[in-house]
Image (tube, helix red, strand yellow):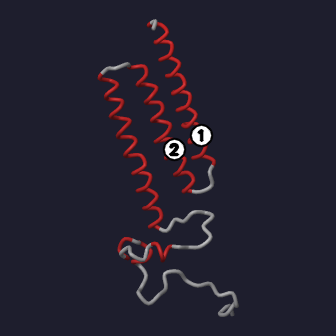
Amino acid sequence: MDMSLLDLACNIATGIAFATGSFFLLVGAFGIVRLPDFWSRLHAAGVIDTAGAEIILIGMMFQTGWDIATLKLILIAFLLFITSPTATHAVSNAAFVAGLRPQDLKKDETEQTLSDVPTAAIPYRSMLPESEPAAPSKSSSGEGSA
């Protein structure tokens, strides 16, 4: 196989990887700006971190050849692949525990989900006295509006 043909194939593969990675980055960036709530935006940020950056790193690996730089890029890609979803999960878990709920949540499952979490870890619960309920009930009869 001719060396110039191999270089051409490597350049084409790099271009495809860069274009695909850039597409994921652009779609994720538009998602962060345009999506309606925190949860959707967090998903878009996770796509940017994991898919977009990984594919661009693969394109860089095509250009470096078999060198120590390729090994470093593989290590960066591996760490990014492990830490990005972990960080996204940690942020979403902290937001859920803090009381932030998805916009289209039909039923509030907070008490069922957080029943095994200590009350010190839930800020709004630890400030309430034990006798009061966690969420005040709304009265539709209009009593007490004199």
Task: Give, as a three-letter code, the residue at label 2.
Answer: Val
Residue under numbered circle 1: 27
Which residue shows up at 35% across the image and 40% down it?
79
Q: Are marks 2 and 1 in contact (CB under 8 Å)?
A: yes
Examine the rendered structure and indicate whether residue 58 appears above or below residue 27.
Answer: above
Which residue shows up at 57% across the image and 41% down it?
29
Examine the rendered structure and indicate whether residue 40 appears above or below residue 9.
Answer: below
Alpha carbon of mark 2 to alpha carbon of mark 1: how far?
A: 9 Å
| Viewer-proximal residue among 5 and 87 | 5
Residue farthest to the left?
68
| Viewer-proximal residue among 111 and 1 | 1
- Quadrant holding the N terminus: top left
What element does badge 1 sit on? Answer: helix
Q: Earlier in the sequence, mark 2 or mark 1?
A: 1
- Quadrant holding the C terminus: bottom right
| Viewer-proximal residue among 134 and 3 | 3
Task: Give, as a three-letter code, the residue at label 1.
Answer: Val
Examine the rendered structure and indicate whether residue 28 appears above or below residue 126.
Answer: above
- Disc 1 crowd rating (10 Å Cα; few below 14, some 14-19, many 20+) is some
In the rendered image, residue 107, in percent from the top left (x then y), is placed at 59, 73
In the rendered image, residue 75, in percent from the top left (x then y), is placed at 32, 34
Residue under numbered circle 2: 47
Res 129 → quadrant: bottom left
Which residue shows up at 36% across the image and 38% down it?
78
In the rendered image, residue 32, in percent from the top left (x then y), is placed at 57, 47
